[in-house]
Image: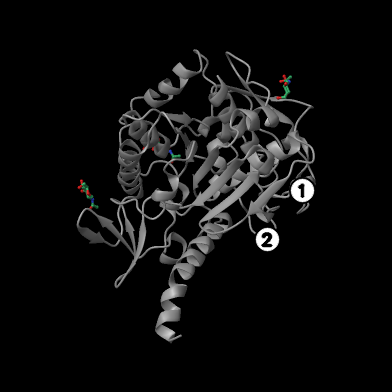
């Protein structure tokens, strides 16, 4: 084989390696290079229009407004007996000494979340496919759901394949597969003469795989704030026909998400597929947000009390609401931003196994288990 051919074959692999390196950089960032807030003059979206769509389906109860309460029956599983947890989320394995963070359950103000029953889930969705599409926060949620189901059906047979971009976890007796499709921006990155180009207007690379899945859970945001060619994974942005070096990242996210929305509207048959958007997952690098200006998530052992986050809402979450409300496809927003903002205690912090401080991802067991309980609730209510 000629060198040229080999390098052609290796190119996609290389790009994927670069991408996953950049995802690691997310964990190692001391601070997000761009603050999550105050980045833009974008007016806040009409509040909660898209969540209302969700609320209607859940008979008047807003699942996402409530508080954290101590619950001795938590967590759902033991990290050492779940074979699907990637190193970076296995905080107990890497020596996290406090365990209280495992023992909080989310209590909505106006209803109770149904008890998670993995076997009922498998029976209900027998022969079906569930897919998480997005960045490492999708990985977090995908692994969590796998562990929750695995723990509720003792001895269940599984087939687990970790690949890039598509990983899968199959519960064989039920024919249920949980997929993970890794694509941090949802829109395409193409390798071109000028370098890697982030295409705000096209979704082709993974889209064929997403069609015909029974439950789709999309997520994207964290990578849009990465800066520097190495950690962002691209050299140029293509906006319409123009190729540019950079632009306001919230504007870029808005354009990319709008492309995603159009793709969903054109390609998803809602009689076959339920579509969810995993809301914006917050970070806790800036203690000022919760009135501890000298701190970040390190050493945090308790959630914030109450139902509101002192640091306020995230502009990216407004963009998500606005884009979802402009769609003709009903997309259920898993509106996990505020409830997650209250969980400054739930990040790997220094227990992610790589010596860095990670205030972006979440320990497993932990907060993503609640996201999945809410997904389960939304599917069954
Ligand atoms: C955001 O901007 C407003 C108005 O300029 C300011 O009062 C507020 O302190 C800023 N918030 C943060 C978190 O920087
Ligand atoms: C604790 O969690 C379990 C399982 O989800 C639930 O059935 C129970 O009602 C919760 N208890 C409290 C006090 O919230
Ligand atoms: C990107 O394209 C949009 C829509 O065509 C346009 O409104 C915007 O000004 C462009 N932004 C940049 C930075 O090129």
Give the number of marks: 2
Residue 110: quarter of image: top right
Q: Is residue 281 above or below residue 350?
A: above
Residue 51 vs 13, above or below: the answer is: above
Q: Residue furthest bottom?
A: 2
The residue identified by callout 2 is 355
Q: Is residue 304 visible?
A: no
Return the x and y of residue 306 as percentages of the image width and height. 60, 23
Q: Nearer the viewer, residue 337 or 112?
A: 112
Please, is residue 279 above or below residue 66 in the view?
Answer: below
On the question of residue 242 being in view, the answer is yes
Q: Position of residue 150 (x, y in %)?
A: 72, 40
Q: Please tell me which of labels 2 and 1 falls first in the chain.
A: 1
Which of the two marks, 2 or 1, is nearer to us in this view?
Answer: 1
As rendered, which of 197 and 115 lies closer to the eye?
Answer: 115
Could you classify mark 2 by the number of other residues whose Cα lies within 10 Å: few (under 14), some (14-19), or many (20 or more)?
few
Q: Dot 1 corresponds to which residue?
A: 92
Who is closer to the viewer here, 76 or 127?
A: 127
- x, y percentage for residue 238? 27, 57
Residue drawn at point x = 42 percent, y = 41 percent: 37
Secondary element type, mark 2: loop
Going 26% across and 60% down the picture, which residue do you hit? Answer: 244
**Residue 104 spot, x, y in % from top left:** 70, 29
Q: Residues within 10 Å of mark 1 (few under 14, many from 20)?
A: some
Q: Secondary structure at mark 1?
A: loop
Question: Is the distance from the Cβ of mark 1 to the nearest ligand 2 atom less than 8 Å?
Answer: no
Q: Quadrant of residue 65?
A: top right
Between 56 and 329, the one nearer to me in the picture: 329
| The C terminus - image quarter | top right
How far apart marks 2 and 1 lie (CA) works out to 14 Å
Q: Residue at x 57, y 34 (%)?
A: 340
């Amino acid at each position: 084989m000629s060198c040229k051919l080999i390098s052609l074959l290796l190119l996609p692999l290389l790009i994927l390696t670069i991408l996953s390196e950049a995802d690691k950089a997310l964990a190692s960032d001391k601070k997000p290079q761009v603050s999550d807030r105050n980045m833009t003059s974008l007016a806040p979206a009409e509040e909660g229009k898209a969540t209302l769509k969700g609320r209607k389906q859940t008979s008047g109860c807003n699942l996402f407004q409530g508080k954290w309460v101590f619950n001795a029956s938590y967590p759902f599983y033991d990290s050492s007996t779940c074979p699907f947890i990637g190193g970076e989320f296995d905080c107990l394995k890497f020596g996290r000494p406090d365990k209280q963070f495992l023992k909080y359950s989310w209590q909505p103000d106006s209803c109770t979340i149904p008890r998670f029953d993995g076997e009922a889930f498998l029976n209900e969705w027998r022969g079906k496919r569930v897919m998480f599409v997005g960045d490492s926060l999708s990985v977090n949620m995908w692994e969590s759901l796998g562990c929750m189901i695995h723990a509720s059906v003792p001895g269940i047979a599984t087939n687990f394949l970790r690949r890039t971009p598509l990983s899968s976890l199959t519960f064989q007796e039920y024919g249920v597969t949980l997929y993970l499709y890794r694509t941090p921006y949802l829109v395409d990155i193409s390798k071109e003469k000028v370098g890697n180009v982030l295409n705000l207007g096209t979704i082709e690379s993974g889209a064929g795989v997403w069609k015909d899945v029974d439950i789709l859970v999309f997520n994207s945001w964290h990578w849009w704030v990465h800066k520097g060619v190495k950690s962002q994974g691209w050299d140029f942005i293509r906006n319409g026909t123009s190729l540019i070096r950079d632009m306001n990242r919230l504007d870029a996210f808005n354009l990319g998400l709008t492309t995603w929305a159009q793709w969903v509207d054109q390609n998803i048959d809602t009689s076959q597929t339920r579509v969810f958007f995993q809301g914006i997952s917050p970070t806790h690098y800036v203690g000022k947000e919760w009135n501890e200006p000298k701190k970040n998530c390190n050493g945090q052992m308790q959630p914030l009390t109450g139902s509101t986050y002192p640091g306020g809402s995230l502009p990216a979450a407004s963009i998500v609401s606005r884009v979802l409300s402009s769609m003709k496809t009903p997309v259920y927003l898993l509106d996990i931003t505020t409830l997650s903002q209250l969980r400054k205690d739930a990040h790997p912090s220094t227990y992610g196994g790589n010596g860095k401080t990670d205030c972006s991802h979440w320990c497993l067991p932990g907060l993503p288990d609640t996201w999945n309980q809410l997904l389960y609730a939304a599917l069954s209510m």
